[in-house]
Amino acid sequence: MSKEPSAQGEHDKGATESVEIRPELIHEALDKIVNSPAFAQSTRLTRFLRFVVEHSVENKPEQLKEYSIGLSVFDRNEGYDPRTDPIVRVEAGRLRTKLREYYSAEGKDDPVVIQLPKGSYVPAISLRDLGLQETASPPRLPKPSPILALLLVVAIGACALASFLYLQNRELRRTVQATKRPAVSPELLPLWGPFLSPGTDLHVVFGVPFFLTAPEYRLFLRAYDINEPDALESNPGYQRLKGVLGPLSGPRYDYALVGESLAVVKLSAFFAASGVSLKAKEAQKTNWDSIQTGNIILLGAPRMNHLLRRFPQSIDFEWASDVEVRNRKPEPGEKEIYTALFHEGFYELNPANWQNAYTYVIVCSFPGFVPNREILVLSAHGGPGILGAVEHLTRPETVGPLLARIKVGPTDKNRYFQLLLRVFVDRGEPIRTEYVTHHIKSYPHSETP
């Protein structure tokens, strides 16, 4: 069986050109890798590596396609679309990283090198030295002297003692850190528990309005229907503005909505009280690749947050306009369209009706891109809706009854929800938030890495 040589790297210097490698040697190398500390606790990567290596050994390259791997390794359903579900590409990147870590440490002297080339799911398997082919005879080792044997026993004992002390100190540090972290209210754990894991990145991505400038008139302007910076010249609204105002420049992202900014501040304080720091990111400076390994909270309207416009999962509730939410899968008793009574200029047009103003917020939970991670979406047109939802979801007295109503508990690891809230607004300030309806969703639960 002929294998392609691996790409040159620090861990495979000296690898041979393409040679015949016995399958038993490959399986021995594979077993050593998956039982190493780098892989022992990652069942998903172990399944991935075994699948591609064994199918390669069996000369079944037709099975090493993204779609086939998604079905066989990651339990995706028939007909899943790899373009919207990047799980195979994400895990392939993690697998390449783990293999580099393995060959730079424990596997640095392994005779057989297994790699997953970038852009392919067919492993590259090579020998580190041509002398390791079948005809090679093992080197004769000198008989150890009694003194050398004694030194070896002492060294092993010292290593065992050092390992014991290290583990004891690690457990002590964990205990001390746990006592420093304030207890989280039990009512909050079903929603926020996955986001409170120490040492896990937490990304909060908020939307930023898209602005243009008209230099001739010294205007700084915002058009609601212009949100894609890469397609300005084909946008009719952009062309109309150019016809009226002359040359335009942009995009500019100089401002954020006050409500969303205050929501980020409240989330920062909420997580800081539990010993977790979040990383606030502007949507236009963020992509999925940069946040995929952490927990993620997405804030804002799809027109201001491109990650919401290109979200990889299906959401039952979607914005049909600035004031209308479309229910794509109405259940008995639900409306197909929910219309808000809040928009720009509402108070000027309805000075006597301000106490009835309300907007909607779409709140959805999803599994993250890697095991033991979560994604939470809070989508609204207008900062007051986002701020009202964050305040409602971070208070034990309000989130407890809400989660009890939608029947999501701390042990429902395979159950996620899509929820519609109504936020009443008084002159730009959220004053009350109430439940409207919800859908429960189930997804294959990520394996523990």
Image (tube, helix red, strand yellow):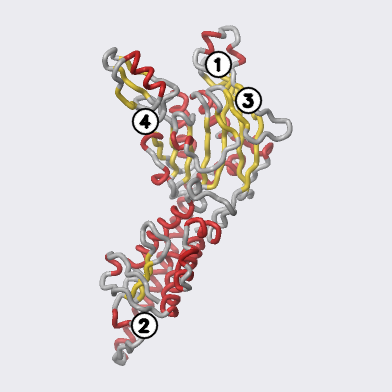
Query: Which image quarter holds the N terminus?
Result: bottom left
Where disc 1 sits, the SS reads: strand
Please identify, in this view, whether the residue under mark 1 or under mark 3 is nearer the observer.
3
Please identify, in this view, whether the residue under mark 2 or under mark 3 is nearer the observer.
3
Sequence-wise, the earlier of marks 4 and 3 is 4
* 207, 250: nearer the viewer: 250
Which residue is denoted by mark 2 in the rendering? 153
- Amino acid carrying mark 2 in the image: Val
Residue 161 figure quarter: bottom left
Q: Is residue 449 left or right of residue 96?
A: right
Q: Position of residue 209 (x, y in %)?
A: 41, 26
Sequence-wise, the earlier of marks 1 and 3 is 3
Which residue is denoted by mark 3 in the rendering? 338
Residue 315 figure quarter: top right
Which disc number belongs to residue 426? 1
Question: Residue sitting at 40 percent across and 46 percent down?
Answer: 289
Q: CA distance from mark 2 to mark 3?
A: 75 Å
Q: Residues within 10 Å of mark 1 (few under 14, many from 20)?
A: some
- Amino acid carrying mark 3 in the image: Tyr
258 up-or-down from 55: above or below: above
Which residue is denoted by mark 4 in the rendering? 229
Q: CA distance from mark 1 to mark 3?
A: 20 Å
Please identify, in this view, whether the residue under mark 4 or under mark 3 is nearer the observer.
4
Q: CA distance from mark 1 to mark 2?
A: 76 Å
Sequence-wise, the earlier of marks 2 and 4 is 2
